[in-house]
């Protein structure tokens, strides 16, 4: 499936919103999960391939010129307008996806499959805990929009500075703690330490924790060992690893997650 860029908006210095329409979006089947994601395939700048393409079109194409797969959260699906909104984290020219989003303009095409997803805020708990960094904000934002009116939500989010904070509308009773890396020596401890210092509301809760691998791992260990969170009742997963390229992280991610499972 492919779609065309309808609009591009810089939300913050590190977040770009791209709205897609047209193409084959008439066949898009949305997921009820608030962490629904698409599997996008980004073409290198000098690739001889154009969108749309088939696997047969890739025969004989050098590996470095082939499409690069990346997963991105569905921030919003507008069924009436057949518009798909994706928020991209962009830090300079690092990575295929972020640099693509910075160059994107109306009419550009992106090929993808999906969506898939697994988390949606439970209606059977008293409150919700959502924790993450910029990479998790699209899913957190989608979840907050799906929350029932008045339902209590505690959000802890880490970004570079105050200019990178996002407006996250919700009908719920939402408390957001914004953490800033700027000026902090041990940025890897910022998110875990903040969660560990929280006073949790009374009652049952579900958990959504996603973002940088080491930070997610530390938060997971705390929640499972100190807060009585069940492995089965939590959505906890690393999206990326600091100092690793996307390709390098993909190579070790499965082993990382397997090792993480042994923490608690």
Image (cartoon, helix red, strand yellow):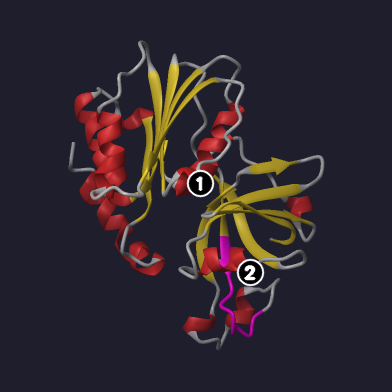
Membership of 47 in magenta stretch: yes
Crowding at dot 2, Cα within 10 Å, few <14 / some 14-19 / many 20+, comes out as few
Residue drawn at x 76%, y 64% is 106
Residue drawn at x 55%, y 68% is 99
**Separation of residues labelled 2 and 1 (CA atoms):** 22 Å
Secondary structure under badge 1?
helix
> In the image, residue 186 lies at what x, y percent?
23, 49
Taking 235 as reference, is 81 above or below it?
Answer: below
Residue drawn at x 69%, y 42% is 77
Left or right side of 168 for 204: left
> In the image, residue 79 lies at what x, y percent?
77, 41
Residue 103's label in the rendered image is: 2
Q: In this view, which residue lies farthest toward the front?
A: 183
- The chief SS type of the magenta part is loop
- Residue 232 quadrant: top left
Membership of 146 in magenta stretch: no
- Residue 166 quadrant: top right
> In the image, residue 27 lies at what x, y percent?
75, 52
Range covered by the magenta-colored residues: 40-49
Q: Is residue 82 visible?
A: yes
Left or right side of 95 for 144: right
Crowding at dot 1, Cα within 10 Å, few <14 / some 14-19 / many 20+, comes out as few
In this figure, which residue is indicated by the disc labeled 1? 163
Q: On the rendered image, what quadrant is the N terminus found in?
A: bottom right
Which of disc 1 and disc 2 is earlier in sequence?
Answer: 2
């Amino acid at each position: 499936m492919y779609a065309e860029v309808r609009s591009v908006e810089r939300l913050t210095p590190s977040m770009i919103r791209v709205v897609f329409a047209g193409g084959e979006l008439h066949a898009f089947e949305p997921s009820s999960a608030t962490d629904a994601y698409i599997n996008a395939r980004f073409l290198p700048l000098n690739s001889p391939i154009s969108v749309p393409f088939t696997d047969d079109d890739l025969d004989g194409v050098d590996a470095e010129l082939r499409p690069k797969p990346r997963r991105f959260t569905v921030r919003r699906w507008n069924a009436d307008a057949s518009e798909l909104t994706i928020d991209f984290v962009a830090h300079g020219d690092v990575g295929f996806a972020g640099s693509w989003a910075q160059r994107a303009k109306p009419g550009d095409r992106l090929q993808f499959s999906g969506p898939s997803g697994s988390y949606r805020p439970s209606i059977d708990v008293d409150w919700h805990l959502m924790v993450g960094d910029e990479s998790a904000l699209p899913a957190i934002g989608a979840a907050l929009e799906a929350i029932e009116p008045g339902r209590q939500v505690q959000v802890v989010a880490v970004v570079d500075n105050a200019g990178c904070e996002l407006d996250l509308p919700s009908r719920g009773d939402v408390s957001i703690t914004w953490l800033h890396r700027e000026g902090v020596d041990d940025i890897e401890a910022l998110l875990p330490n903040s969660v560990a210092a929280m006073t949790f509301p009374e009652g049952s809760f579900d958990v959504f924790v996603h973002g940088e691998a080491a930070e997610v791992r530390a938060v997971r260990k705390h929640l499972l060992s100190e807060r009585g969170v069940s492995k089965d009742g939590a959505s906890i997963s690393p999206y990326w690893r600091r100092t690793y390229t996307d390709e390098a992280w993909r190579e070790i991610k499965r082993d990382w997650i397997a090792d993480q499972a042994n923490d608690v």
